[in-house]
Image: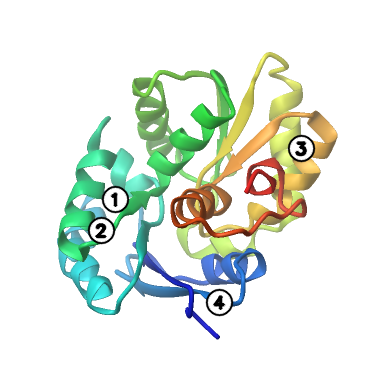
């Protein structure tokens, strides 16, 4: 039965379309996703402020819906507030929701440490200014960023970038950076999870993509058995 074992809450700054599509392909049938959004439509501080203003209320609301864990999706809002902000956001969400939580950029760092990665390549759909914030955050967590690339996808068109297009861009960047330990692909709003296995198969590099990393943290915390070889090495570790 839906959510009979665990209910995982999700807070998305924007629409929630790729996340549920990804989630229900890897989660067992008795683990449910309970999601809310702030419906922002641009990458800028004013919209990020709007999303953060709703965060405490949203976390409290999800807590009232009996969730066992909360995922705050998306890196740009957190990275825009500077290094270390992710842990502050998690503390706020956990306090308001009375449940454990994570946020995407912290999930990614946790996953990168778990696989003992040090030298990272980042490929995102974000504008250059957002990418720079993410790089600063990742570096502050003790990683080396060897390359930073962007597909520069318009905010409202993230869903339309195909997995093959994402994979080809990532493979190209990795082939130019052969000393990398891992690839970080942020953003839960594009179809990165479906590109992971192709990238790993062709390059031999482990990929830490946004949705798989968030699910991995939540499932690992809750003891959910959801191992899958279809979507890359990280989820297979469950």
Residue furthest out toward the top: 179
Who is closer to the viewer here, 181 or 233?
Answer: 233
Label 1 and label 4: CA atoms lie apart by 38 Å
Tag 3 secondary structure: helix
The label on residue 47 is 2
Q: How far across and how far down the image is residue 140, in percent?
A: 34, 22
- Residue assigned mark 1: 44
Q: Nearer the viewer, mark 1 or mark 4?
A: 4
Q: Is residue 29 visible?
A: yes
Name the residue that disc number 4 marks: 30
Q: Quadrant of the N terminus?
A: bottom right
| Front residue of 93 and 219 | 219
* Relative vertical location of residue 192 with respect to residue 175 in this rendering, above or below: below
Report the colour scheme: rainbow
Q: Residues within 10 Å of mark 1 (few under 14, many from 20)?
A: some
Query: Residue at 35% of width from left, 50% of height from top?
Result: 102
Number of numbered callouts drawn? 4
- In the rendered image, the vertical position of residue 16 relative to residue 154, given as above or below: below
User: Which residue shows up at 31% across the image and 48% down it?
Assistant: 77
Contact flag, marks 4 and 2 (Cβ < 8 Å): no
- How far separated are the C-alphas under marks 3 and 4? 29 Å
Residue topped by disc 3: 200
Other residues around mark 4 within 10 Å, as few (<14) / some (14–19) / many (≥20): few
Q: Secondary structure at mark 1?
A: loop
């Amino acid at each position: 039965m839906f959510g009979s074992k665990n209910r995982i809450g999700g807070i998305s700054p924007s629409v929630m379309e790729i996340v549920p599509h990804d989630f229900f392909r890897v989660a067992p049938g008795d683990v449910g996703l309970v999601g809310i959004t702030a419906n922002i439509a641009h990458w800028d501080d004013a919209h990020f402020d709007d999303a953060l203003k709703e965060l405490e209320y949203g976390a409290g609301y999800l807590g009232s819906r009996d969730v066992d864990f909360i995922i705050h999706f998306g890196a740009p809002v957190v990275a825009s507030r500077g290094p270390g902000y992710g842990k502050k956001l998690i503390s706020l969400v956990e306090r308001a929701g009375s449940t454990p939580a994570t946020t995407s950029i912290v999930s990614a760092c946790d996953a990168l440490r778990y696989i003992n990665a040090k030298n990272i390549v980042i490929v995102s759909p974000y504008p250059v200014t957002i990418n720079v914030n993410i790089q600063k955050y990742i570096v502050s967590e003790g990683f080396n960023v060897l390359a930073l690339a962007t597909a520069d996808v318009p905010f409202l068109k993230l869903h339309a970038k195909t997995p093959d297009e994402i994979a080809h861009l990532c493979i190209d960047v990795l082939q130019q950076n052969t000393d990398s330990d891992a690839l970080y692909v942020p953003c839960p709003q594009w179809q990165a999870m479906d590109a992971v296995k192709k990238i790993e198969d062709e390059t031999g590099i482990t990929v830490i993509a946004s949705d798989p990393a968030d699910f991995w943290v939540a499932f690992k915390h809750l003891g959910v058995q959801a191992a899958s070889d279809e979507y890359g090495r990280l989820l297979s570790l469950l």
